[in-house]
Image: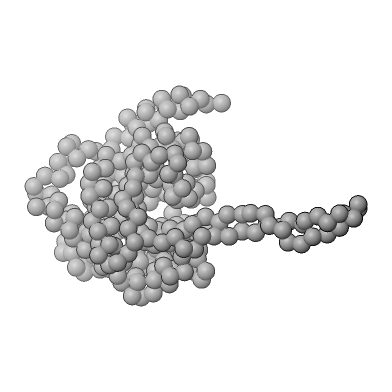
Amino acid sequence: MITFVTRFAATICLILSLHIPTQSSTNKYDNTYKIKTIVIDAGHGGRDGNTHGSFSKEKDITLAVALKLGKTIEKEIEGVKVVYTRTDDSFIELYERIGIANRNKADLFISLHCNSMPHTSRRVVSRYVRNKRGRRVPVYKTISSQNTSVSGVETFVSGYGRLDEQDVAMRENASMLLEENYQENYDGFDPKDPESYIIFSLMKNQYRDLSIKLATFIQNEYIKAGRLDRGVKEQSLAVLARAGMPAVLTEMGFISNPEEEHYMNSAEGQAEIVENLVNAIKNYKKQIEN
């Protein structure tokens, strides 16, 4: 069995071997820098599409918003090219999503997702029967329920999420279990093992401050639109870990909340989300380039 210390040391060696360019080594953010390429990632897709609400699936919402967002960016922000990680209902591995951004030398990476509360199970008494001794005893059944009242928006950057705050990370990273040879692709990382997140968090991208800046602009735009702010957070997310550029994952609302599910499926709701994200990109771009 590989010990935690051995895995820790191996991960340090892995990080040193990645050779992801730093801001200082590329002079990427000097006075002449311009944002030219943005990668839009529609979360999930294909066989990775289990998260759903009462009438819709997360993978369909993220794709619809991604396509609208890309078109709006290219229409409203001059000189910016958009690259999509997927344009249809395809399954794209997590490492390949950020790989697309790295290969295209993207200046920003934005991953779109819908949040969801987990289902919980509990035993309840369904009826009573008489046992062999004539005593009245309960018969139990297990029922599953979901908290549908939780709502709000939050945006994540790659970082040191605490072990007791890894619910989103474990849900989003679970997609890698659908990949062939996922342990090889992610260097032995196990998305079901909380201990792995301590090691995986060391691979956080080198653009933390800029990622937080973009995430903050996004949350500010959501707030202006009247959305409930759940904040900017750091988590050990596989899709962001090896990003060679500022990268964020934004949860556009809770698909488990009926009101937010309707909002994210409506033309008006999607238009507002796109407007929020485009305004955030414009504000970020203006600050970085000037």
Q: Is residue 42 visible?
A: no
Whether 123 is drawn above or below 3: the answer is below
Whether 27 is drawn above or below 42: the answer is above
The furthest residue to the front: 135
Whether 50 is drawn above or below 1: the answer is below
Q: Nearer the viewer, residue 286 or 28?
A: 286
Question: Is the image coloured rainbow, by chain, by secondary structure, or in one colour?
Answer: one colour
What residue is rendered at 31% in x and 50% in y? Answer: 232
The answer to which quarter of the image holds residue 86 is: bottom left
What residue is rendered at 42% in x and 44% in y? Answer: 165
- The x and y percentages for residue 170 are 47, 46
Q: Is residue 254 visible?
A: yes
Whether 50 is drawn above or below 68: the answer is above
What residue is rendered at 9% in x and 49% in y? Answer: 32
What residue is rendered at 27% in x and 39% in y? Answer: 206
Position of 153 with respect to 129 (left or right) is left
- The x and y percentages for residue 13 are 37, 27
- The x and y percentages for residue 141 are 71, 57
Q: Nearer the viewer, residue 176 or 202?
A: 202
The answer to which quarter of the image holds residue 136 is: bottom right
- The x and y percentages for residue 55 are 51, 71
Quarter of the figure that contains the N terminus: top right
Position of 4 with respect to 276 (left or right) is right
The furthest residue to the bottom: 267
Q: Nearer the viewer, residue 42 or 204?
A: 204
Q: How many marks?
A: 0
